[in-house]
Image (cartoon, grey):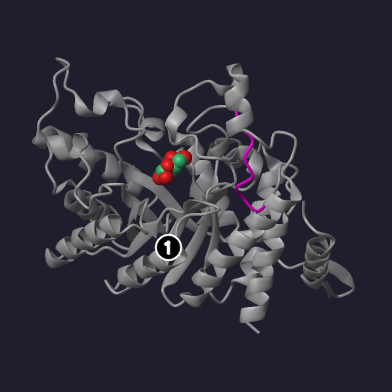
Amino acid sequence: MKSVSDIKVYLIIGLATTFNVAGCSRQTTLKEAFKKDFYIGAALNQEQISGKDANAIAVVRKHFNSITPENILKWSLVHPEPNTYNFEPADQFVALGEKNNMFIVGHTLVWHHQAPDWLFVGTTGKPVDREILLKRMKEHIFTVVGRYKGRIDGWDVVNEAVGNDGQMRKNKWVEIIGKDYVQKAFEYARQADPKAELYYNDFNMWQKGQREGVIRLIRDLQSKGVRVDGIGIQGHYGLDYPPLDELEESIVAFAELGVKVMITELDITVLPSAWGHRGADITLNFELQEKLNPYVKGLPDSEQNNLAGRYAELFSLFHKHRDKISRVTFWGVHDGQSWRNYWPVEGRTDYPLLFDRQYQPKPAFYTIIKIASNKNQ
Ligand code: GLA
């Protein structure tokens, strides 16, 4: 349980981050707190983009100055059939960002997940060859990036091309096109919108093998004259990982490549690892429920406290490297929408973000605001 003194700290922080503007009490917003440091982004789901989840949009408009679509620009959603594009949600997403003067990120052009089955096969059902897949990739990139030319500010061009061992991940893109599929994707995206920023985005980025593999990949692209504007570090973290010194090493090493560094998909799970039970329906198994889903009725104060502390450590590090980091994007707006509730097993109750299921700021929110106001004084 949280001690009385911890609770007092949160109350004081909460009060300290509320101040008076022209007689009205106003809470400091995330985007204001980090205005001089980096963009504060959120990933939006379809309900939010369409305006159905109006409460979430109110939070986004108040606290965030950058948006990324969680799913709607992934290949299988925006281009589900060879000759069918579904642009309506993406049009709404871009309009929302423009209306609110936000830095708009497109996610993601080339990835091995959430890619439709037809993409890699021909009419006979056999895998297509390099030439056809490159043609499909180019057509997709030109159509999607071209549609939002001058409106989407930055694109995650390639997602997760490098494995944990630092080698190119084995996927259909490599199998069919070869390792230069990454280079081709960047070239097509540059042609489609020369002014957009183009990023490489991946996970496990604090790990040595991953870090070195990504550095090799980016150096290789640079040596071929391919400009990469930024590296996205997906931040799907936990209370006890990643080690901050290793993450810091990656932030510094990536920045030394002359590119912007971004924390692109930040959330911190408070639940026990469930990777060993991937795909299991834990709702049918009482023992697993107890073990893997312990906080259905609410997060105990002690864990709330740990989460706030973890966010504080991370944001102190990000703030320290604010000259290298251009954006920190949370993977979602509020706990209720997070993918952590349904992956790697369905039906859990997680608390990974700064806003709770009632759209209210959590203690972690106040600790982060406090860091910004202390450090930026
Ligand atoms: C990866 C992708 C994201 C999202 C998360 C999990 O990090 O880049 O788009 O799918 O996995 O939801």
Name the residue located 20 percent from the left edge and 34 percent from the top edge.
172
Q: Is residue 123 left or right of residue 109?
A: left
What's the amino acid at mark 1? Answer: Met
The residue that label 1 is drawn on is: 262
On the question of residue 196 being in view, the answer is no
Point 19% across, 47% down: residue: 168
Q: Nearer the viewer, residue 134 or 210?
A: 210
Query: Is label 1 in a helix, a strand or a loop?
Result: strand
Q: Main secondary structure of the magenta part?
A: loop
Q: Residue at horizontal 60%, vertical 36%?
A: 47
Q: x, y percentage for residue 302? A: 72, 52
| Residue 292 in the image, given as x and y percentages of width and height | 58, 33
Position in image of residue 294 (x %, y %): 66, 35
- Can you tell which quarter of the image residue 111 is in? top left
Is any atom of residue 327 visible in this view? yes
At x 23%, y 50%, the residue is 165
In magenta segment, residue 352: yes
**145, 131: nearer the viewer:** 131
Q: Is residue 172 above or below residue 123?
A: below
Camera-side residue of 89 and 2? 2
Which span is picked out in magenta?
A: 347-354
Q: Is residue 219 above or below residue 205?
A: below
Residue 311, above or below 168? below
Q: Quadrant holding ligand 1?
A: top left
Q: Nearer the viewer, residue 16 or 20?
A: 16
